[in-house]
Amino acid sequence: MIYVSIVTSIMLIQLFVFSLKSGMAREKDNVKAPATSGNQHFERLYRVHHNTMELLIIAIPSMWIFATHVHAMGAAGLGFVYVIGRVIYAKAYVADPESRGLGFMISMIPTVVLMFGALIGAIITMVKTGQLY
């Protein structure tokens, strides 16, 4: 489970970096809080941050449940693919939002596998251990 812990930490650091970039762009591009629009550069970084946060809330718990009931190294590997996808997504989205598809898919596919794999793994564990009630 140590690899799952490391990948979780990397995911959180990545989100933190995206948050910092969004905040720095807010200052640089003079977008006063609470506004979330007004400058394309800031808006793109802001969306990268928030889109990542939205997906991360699914990815992290799914990765841990998958690691517990299916396979820890598999969970860590899928989580790391998610991280790579988010890097590609962020670079593409900031350059041209229309080009974000590849990074989106590279991070979405492992998230979906983790999510459904976690559910199936937990159900199999429940059945195998007789915890049906």
Image (cartoon, rainbow, N blue to C red):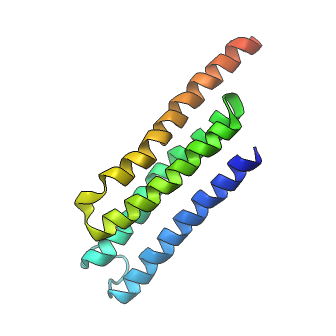
Choose top left, top right, bottom left or bottom right for residue 38: bottom left
How far from the left and from the top, in percent, is residue 16?
Answer: 55, 68
Residue pictured at 30% horizontal, 51% vertical: 101
Image height of 132 relative to 18, above or below: above
Q: Nearer the viewer, residue 129 or 79?
A: 79
Residue 78 occupies quadrant: top right
Residue 133: tell me if it is visible.
no
What residue sits 66% from the left and 28% below the top?
70
Residue drawn at 53 percent across, 64 percent down: 15
Judged left or right of residue 36, residue 10 is: right
Residue 17's spot in the image, x, y percent? 53, 71
Say whether residue 26 is left or right of residue 113: left
Relative placement, left or right, of 37 versus 88 is left
Examine the rendering and report whether any part of residue 6 can be seen.
yes
Q: In which quarter of the image is the C terminus?
A: top right
Q: How many tags in the picture? A: 0
Q: Nearer the viewer, residue 3 or 55?
A: 3
| Residue 109, above or below 34 | above
Pinpoint residue 83: horizontal percent, then vertical percent: 52, 55
